[in-house]
Amino acid sequence: MRPWILAEQNHHDLQQRKWEVAVLPFGATEPHNLHMPYGTDNYQVEAIGERACRKAYEAGANVLLLPAVPFGVNTNHLQIPGGLALNVVPTTLLAILSDLVDALERQGLRKLVLLNGHGGNELKPLARQLHHRTKVFLCVCDWFRMATDRYKEIFDRPGEHADEVETSLGLAYFPHLMFPDRADDGAAAPTKLEAINKGWVSITRPWHLVSKNTGLGDPRTATADKGRRLMDILVDRLGSFLIDLAKTPMDDKFPY
């Protein structure tokens, strides 16, 4: 039993604990090229959250990892031929988050980290909408943005989806579900509009048009060692943040 994971606790133990910080992982269930499982986003965010919470807990911080939300905003995946993506719309995600924040606030928890593992889950607008409704401090951490400054020293050609980065994490932490020999090169199809291709105009990309087999980024240089090296950085950074967040008292000016 790992005391920093809510799902593994029992009522006897929880009656005696007061938690300072909760971490709520958000994932998705969607295709990841030909070589990765549909639960990739969930497996990754849970692995990161579990290890970061362990680091913080073992340093004396009362942090608790909540069960992951396995459904993400996948409106642009719904026309993939032969595919299956479990989709919720942003308003549904807001309703889920609102209910969970209300439950935590009623039970005295005042600090909540939204740990996001899926690019379609834009959680910051949801946190903004709840900001004036709750006494719970909300912050958003997209794990895939957490260590991009270190990617050059680990990866050859990081991409976006089922790429070298995600594939390396898969090979390291759920290898029994990986089939790297099946992967294609993850090439992205350009649009007819140069401003979109250059990135200063954004759209919701129809995934069945932008990618041949749902991957964006070449995964073929991925290794388990690269995944473990990245995980070390992610755990160190997020774990250290959780320690600081837990020990910082809340007052009228928090977090300033």
Image: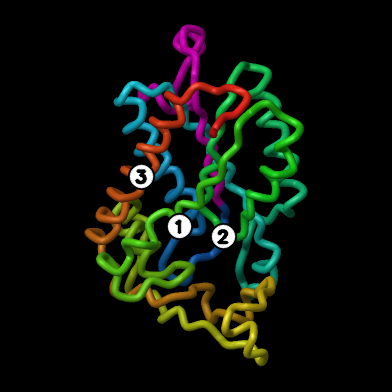
Q: Earlier in the sequence, mark 2 or mark 3?
A: 2
Q: In this view, does 60 lie above or below 39?
A: above
Check disc 3 and report its element: helix, strand or loop.
helix
Image position of 49 with respect to 154: above or below? above
Nearer-N-terminus badge (2/1): 2
Q: Which region is colored magenta? A: 1-27
Mark 1, other Cα within 10 Å: few <14 / some 14–19 / many ≥20: some
The percent position of residue 2, horizontal first and vertical second, equals 36, 25
Identify which residue is drawn at 57% across, 83% down.
198
Which of 111 and 210 lies nearest the eye of the viewer?
111
CA gap between label 1 and label 3 equals 13 Å
Label 3 environment density (alpha carbons within 10 Å; few <14, some 14–19, many ≥20): some
Mark 1, secondary structure of its residue: helix
> What residue is at 53 percent from the left and 35 percent from the top?
67
Total marks placed: 3
Identify the residue shown where x is 66% and y is 22%: 105
- The answer to which of marks 1 and 3 sits earlier in the sequence is 1
- Marker disc for residue 237: 3
Residue position marked by numbered label 1 in the rendering? 144
Label pair 2/1, CB-CB below 8 angstroms: yes
Magenta run includes residue 21: yes
Q: In this view, does 255 lie above or below 201?
A: above
* Camera-nearest residue between 75 and 62: 62
Q: Which of 74 and 152 is in front in this view?
A: 152
